[in-house]
Amino acid sequence: MTNQDEHKEGIGGMINPRRYGIERVAYLLMRLSGLGLLAYFIAHIYETSSILKGQVGWNEFLELTQTNAGHAILAIVIGMCVFHTVNGIRVMLGQGGVGVGKPARPDYPYPPASQNIRHKMGIYSAITLAAIAMMYGLAIMFGE
Amino acid sequence: MRESIIMKIHYGTALAAVALVAVHILMRLTQGFAESLEYDSVIANYKFLPYAGMLEIILILLSIHGFNGLRVILLELKQGKTYEKAVSYGCIAAMITLIVYGSRTIIMVNTGMT
């Protein structure tokens, strides 16, 4: 009897975006953006607590973040935030049964009804909007 | 708590956070990004009670959503009774710690304890 565990791929299987199409890429990006945003949120809470050290402490910390590297990181955060939001709304709608297609007779090659053009457009829209938001954020941060 | 209820909380906190974070970002843009980050401007924001209250709500919503998301990712990777309990309680502990730490900043600045 074979051990089922040897067929598990673990993190390698979880982060492999090459199979199952754009839905798998969206799954991976959703998790990566979620982890990135959580890391940023924790850092942001720590960063803003420097205001308790008074004006000198606040300005010192602001100097660390108001750099080209700081702006670039913030632009990535903006992109992650927009993608996570738009794709999250798509996932919520899908789990609520919106846009997943109607039940039909299963014919070869059995295409999943839920992986349809509406949801694919949702994923591509999320990526496009994230890119636009990043560019807008960069224009605001570097435009001053 | 049932996972279906946890996911409803996850989605509810997400939708509420999107609306409130949009207000938080718009506050930065209406003043001008650099000016809005000046010490006096930030202090004035914290001392304005409705805004401080909104920051507190955002803190709670995002902490719940963020750490539940982390819990979901960690539970996808590995399962087991002990592991699942450790992940769930660890995430709750981290969530409470972050809320307490963030609330401390909001309350201290709002009440002028800087």
Image (spheres, rainbow, N blue to C red):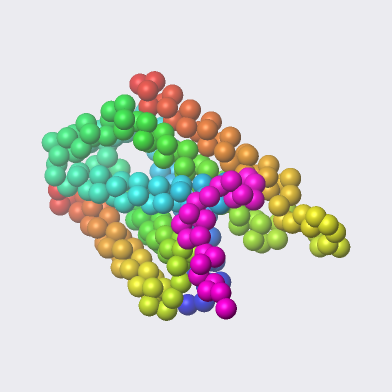
First to last magenta residue range: A1-24
Front-lying residue, A97 or A114: A114
Up/down of B81 relative to A102, above or below: below
Up/down of B78 relative to A46, above or below: below
Q: Outermost residue, front direction? A: A1
Tell me what residue is drawn at x 71 percent, y 52 percent: A115
Q: Position of residue A38 (x, y in %)?
A: 38, 52
Whether residue A127 appears in magenta in the rendering, the answer is: no
- State whether residue B114 appears in this view: yes
Tell me what residue is drawn at x 50 percent, y 51 percent: A15
In this rendering, the count of numbered labels is 0
Q: Position of residue A85 (x, y in %)?
A: 53, 47
What is the quadrant of residue A94 in the picture?
Answer: bottom right
- State whether residue A104 appears in this view: no
Front-lying residue, A8 or A60: A8
Q: Position of residue B36 (x, y in %)?
A: 32, 33
Tell me what residue is drawn at x 56 percent, y 52 percent: A27
What is the quadrant of residue A97 in the picture?
Answer: bottom right
Front-lying residue, A54 or A44: A44
Q: Outermost residue, top direction? A: A143
